[in-house]
Image (spheres, rainbow, N blue to C red):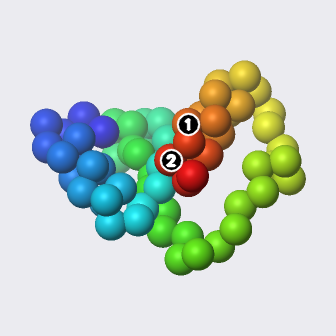
């Protein structure tokens, strides 16, 4: 996430159908944004167990993108 071109790559991956699926802190000398391609898989957010307020906010953002 700390690369100067990360925002451009993320936008293009999103246009190709990839969704934000998480953040991995401090991996490989910095934070890593994880994106995933679901290939028409249905996600029911009610079945996802949330462990913190931050996780709840992250899920809300992911689900906005999923729609």
The 10 Å Cα crowd at callout 2, few under 14, some 14 to 19, many 20 or more, is some
Viewer-side residue, 53 vs 63: 63
Q: Name the residue under label 2.
A: 65
Badge 1 is on which residue? 61
Helix, strand or loop for disc 1:
helix
Spot occupied by residue 29 in the image (x, y as percentages of width and height):
31, 39
In the figure, is residue 11 to the left or right of 25? left
Quarter placement of the N terminus: top left
Q: Residue furthest top?
A: 53
Asked if residue 7 lies left or right of residue 24, the reply is: left
Q: Which residue is drawn at 55% across and 70% down?
A: 38
Q: Which residue is drawn at 71% across and 31% down?
A: 56
| Residue furthest front as drawn | 67
| 17 versus 65 height, above or below | below
Callout 1 environment at 10 Å: few (<14), some (14 to 19), or many (20+)? some
> Residue 64: horizontal and vertical position, in percent?
56, 42
Label 2 to label 1: alpha-carbon separation: 6 Å
Q: Identify whether 40 is placed above or below 11.
A: below
């Amino acid at each position: 996430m700390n690369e100067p071109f990360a925002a451009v790559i993320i936008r293009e991956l999103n246009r190709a159908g990839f969704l934000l699926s998480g953040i991995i802190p401090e991996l490989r000398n910095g934070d890593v944004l994880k994106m995933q391609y679901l290939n028409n898989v249905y996600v029911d957010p009610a079945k996802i167990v949330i462990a913190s307020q931050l996780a709840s906010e992250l899920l809300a953002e992911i689900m906005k993108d999923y729609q």
